[in-house]
Amino acid sequence: MLKGKHLIDPMDLSLEQLDQIFNLADDIIKNPKDYMEVCKGKILATLFYEPSTRTRLSFESAMHRLGGSVVGFSSAGSSSAAKGESVADTVKTIACYADICAMRHPKEGAPKVASLKSDIPVINAGDGGHQHPTQTLTDLLTIRSLKGRLNDFTIGLCGDLKFGRTVHSLIKALSRYSNIKFILISPEELKIPDYIKEEVLIKKDIQFKEVERIEEVIGELDILYMTRVQRERFFNEEDYVRLKDSYILDKKKLKNAKQDMIVLHPLPRVNEISVEIDDDPRACYFKQVKYGMFVRMALIMKLLGVEK
Ligand code: NCD
């Protein structure tokens, strides 16, 4: 049962619960009209203390498409955080107005703290450089839909693996499926944090290798997951400027990739994917955006315990 649960970390959901969410998302995609009123009278609050386009609007469109309503704020400056209110007090207040909330916060662990004080389900919509479980639901539904499976593949994760929370959550989630091989492509300074390597990859005896050059490995990949260098988490601008163009995926690099490889990116992109490949059939990042909305519709329904 998912009703009333919080979603803070991708491991909060069992494989069976993930399947239930994906099956529901598949049905919503096929029969959207059947779901137009299932959340009538319910309110989603979006508490965003950090900028967002996709995640917030995706949650909001998801709720609207289910017939529910939305309240919220889109920056810390426009909430009582600016007056010094704690997230715990904010969420206790929001729980008096809304039935479910999605929170994005620059501090790692803030949504977890909120969930401990909340009477309504709290969804982590990204906490600092830590986790982003609903982007992972998006990524998994995209892979499942486009590749037809969630096991037996080699996935390359490229870019800012240190601060990129989407990568941390995706590795955790995929580590539970069989025969997944990870190729971690990053400059030395932006390598995956040790805790992910030790507590997930090594502990579970999962195959992985770390490389610096995308050209070396692109031919091996079934999925290439590109990421943006996370400027807002750098301590100084100089390092950002030095590292920001480490990877630019273009036609030339894509030449050596498999014909059925898919390129994903949580977006926003800066220039790590050249627009010249947007029309390549392997470029699936805008399809991914759409799956994100459908999977959030399914998640909201499950956490609220509403059915068709
Ligand atoms: C990601 C995020 O916020 O972590 N964006 C998103 O939610 N789709 C990735 C990023 O900002 O680079």
Image (cartoon, helix red, strand yellow):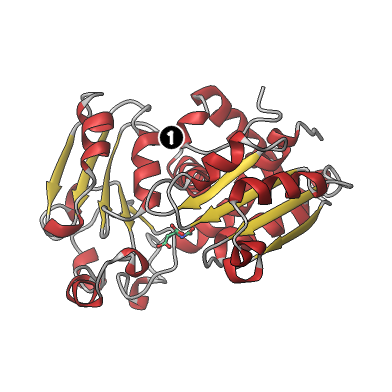
According to the picture, the residue beneath numbered tag 1 turns out to be 149
Judged from the image, the quadrant occupied by ligand 1 is bottom left
Crowding around mark 1 (Cα neighbors within 10 Å: few <14, some 14 to 19, many 20+) is few
Q: Residue at x 29, y 46 (%)?
A: 222
Q: Nearer the viewer, residue 129 or 262?
A: 129
Quadrant of the snapshot with the N terminus: top right
As drawn, 178 above or below 250: above
Depicted 253 relative to depicted 142: above or below: below
| Residue 17 horizontal/vertical position (percent) | 57, 26
Residue name at image x 64 percent, y 37 percent: 117
Where residue 46 sits: x, y (%)?
67, 56
- In which quadrant of the rendered view does residue 114 lie? top right
Residue positioned 19% across, 70% down in the render: 243
Q: Secondary structure at mark 1?
A: loop
What amino acid is labelled 1 in the image?
A: Arg
Number of numbered discs on residues: 1
* Residue nearer the viewer, 241 or 299: 241
Q: Let me know if residue 30 appears in the view.
A: no
Image quadrant occupied by the C terminus? top right
